[in-house]
Image: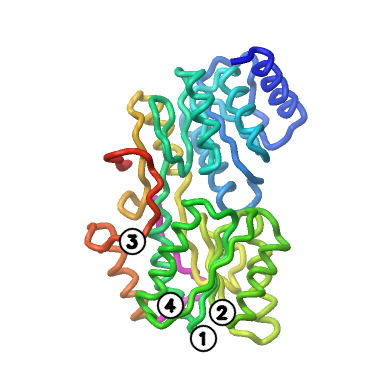
Amino acid sequence: MNQHFRGTATLALLTALACGGDAPSSDDTSADTTPGVALLTPGPVSDAGWNAGAYEGLQRIGDSLGLRISHQQTLTPAEFDEAFISYADAGYGLIFGHGFEYQDAASRVAAEYPEVTFVISGGSRPSANVVALIFQLNEASYLAGMAAGAVTRSGVVGMVGGVEIPTAKGTFVAFEAGVKAVRGDATVLETFIGSWDDVSAAKEAAAAQLREGADVLIHNVDAASFAFFQSVREARERGRVAWAFGMNRDQNDVAPDVIVGSAVIDYTGMFLQTAEAWRDGTLGDRPVYSGLATGTVEFVPNPAQEGLIPADALELIDRARQEIISGTLEVPSIDFIEEEDPVSSQ
């Protein structure tokens, strides 16, 4: 590894921390020898979704385990490598890359830092010190799809996604299956806008699907979710019957007037379990799966819209939940793990 590159990357991170940025004020990347845990996110932690949940998980690690923590938002692939290297050089022994897009950078950097453990949310290539943390959100989005199938009046349901990566696509495959499990004649629309945070694109994509007759929509974006919900809200203000679903985090209180429910990941629980296993030396090198069976993924109806999902549909959803947990119902997914015999978290 080029030493100048390492030094430049470390300097860039320290400069960012000195200027404030997204890093917590407790960071000390120069002199503190306390074991450290770092987090890279591809977007802002103010998104009330994917990145916000990960940041909450990082804070839970700091509060519960007394470890120093740090966060950095990275925008380009070049920054992925630099940030991984910077944190490794600064003594951080556990580094989370929160997204499938961090896999290649983690694989490159991990070879140079065998003593550092890299955890990739949605990772595809685990190795000796690269752990794939797999959120089986498709299980929760399947249940959300069942709810959508029960709520739709038009029989047209929409899905607005960010970047078409396997983890995001998998949630939509499962959602569509859930819709059709309840309403077999439903039409399901799908749009990927090519960005997690492009609010204009997300709003227009939702509006376009509403114009095509969709009356229930789900998203899988990050900060762009605010515009997605606003598009549905504006349709309702014009007299349309329109509803939305949240994704990645419990977003029911983000837009309680239009949200039916949310497909939720318990980031704090999974991040803390992962950090504890790393601290205890039991994390291993195989994928760690998180789903309904582990209690870290769930579909949560919006309490502000009680009664919107019919009682008989809620019974069907609960029955499907139990079947998924027991293994008698297999939810559609996209297999992207280059690994045999994955382990489940306990």
Disc 3 packing (10 Å; few <14; some 14–19; many ≥20): many
Give the image quarter of residue 92. Answer: top right
Q: Name the foreground residue: 103 vs 179.
A: 103
In terms of secondary structure, where does tag 2 sit? loop
- Is there CB contact under 8 Å for labels 4 and 1? no
58 sits left or right of 42 in the view:
left
User: How far is mark 1 from mark 3, CA to CA?
Assistant: 25 Å
Q: Name the foreground residue: 323 vs 272.
A: 323
The amino acid beneath tag 4 is: Gly
Where does label 1 land, which residue?
154
Give the image quarter of residue 217. Answer: bottom right
On the image, the x and y values in percent for residue 275 come to: 43, 32
Indicate yes or no whether the magenta region holds residue 297.
Answer: yes
Lower sequence index among marks 2 and 1: 1
Lower sequence index among marks 1 and 3: 1
* Residue lying at 45% horizontally and 40% vertically, measured from the top left: 123
252 sits left or right of 273 in the view:
right
User: How far is mark 4 from mark 1, CA to CA?
Assistant: 10 Å
The amino acid beneath tag 1 is: Ser
Residues in magenta, as a range: 296-310
Where does label 2 land, which residue?
214
Q: Which callout, 4 or 2, points to the residue nearer the camera?
A: 2
Q: Does 223 sit above or below residue 12?
A: below
Indicate yes or no whether the magenta region holds residue 261.
Answer: no
The amino acid beneath tag 3 is: Val
In terms of secondary structure, where does tag 1 sit? loop
The amino acid beneath tag 2 is: Ala
Lower sequence index among marks 4 and 1: 4
Q: Name the foreground residue: 54 vs 83.
A: 83
